[in-house]
Image: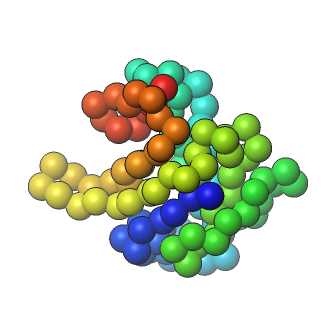
Amino acid sequence: MIILTEQAGTAVKAAMSRAGKLDAGLRVMVEAGGCAGYKYLIGLDAEPRVDDAVVEAGGVKVFIDPDSQPLLSGMTIDFVESLEGSGFTFDNPNAGTKCGCGKSFG
């Protein structure tokens, strides 16, 4: 359903270690907003919610709520470090349009 690159998996595991949440998972979801219609939200979550899909990707448990699942299916999450900064990037085959910042899509 979702693919985490090796770099993204390493970044998530490092965040879990820094937060002292080694058993946590990565919550990935979509909500209305952003400059293109929907925006990505990611964060650490202690455990999945009752109706979440739980996917193992990049050595990390990924929690996805049912409303976000169809919008995220087939997406690849990467972590990029550059002179301009570092952060997660999203390659979503379901996005018809996306904004310049790469954090929202339509």
Q: Nearer the viewer, residue 97 or 9?
A: 97
- Residue 83 to residue 102: above or below: below
| Residue at 58 percent of width and 46 percent of height | 72
Q: Position of residue 95 (x, y in %)?
A: 47, 35
Q: Is residue 100 left or right of residue 29?
A: left
Q: Nearer the viewer, residue 79 or 74?
A: 74
Q: Is residue 21 left or right of residue 75?
A: right
Q: Quadrant of residue 54?
A: bottom right
Q: Quadrant of residue 50?
A: bottom right
The answer to whether residue 34 is visible is no
The answer to whether residue 39 is visible is yes
| Residue at 44 percent of width and 57 percent of height | 77
- Residue 18 to residue 26: above or below: below
| Residue at 68 percent of width and 45 percent of height | 69
| Residue at 51 percent of width and 74 percent of height | 58
Q: Is residue 85 left or right of residue 3?
A: left
Q: Position of residue 100 (x, y in %)?
A: 28, 31
Q: From the image, which quarter does the N terminus lie in?
A: bottom right
Q: Nearer the viewer, residue 97 or 83?
A: 97
Report how many numbered discs are placed on residues in the image. 0
Q: Position of residue 67 (x, y in %)?
A: 73, 37
- Residue 22 to residue 75: above or below: below
Q: How is the image coloured?
A: rainbow
Residue furthest to the right in view is 50
Q: Position of residue 17 (x, y in %)?
A: 51, 76
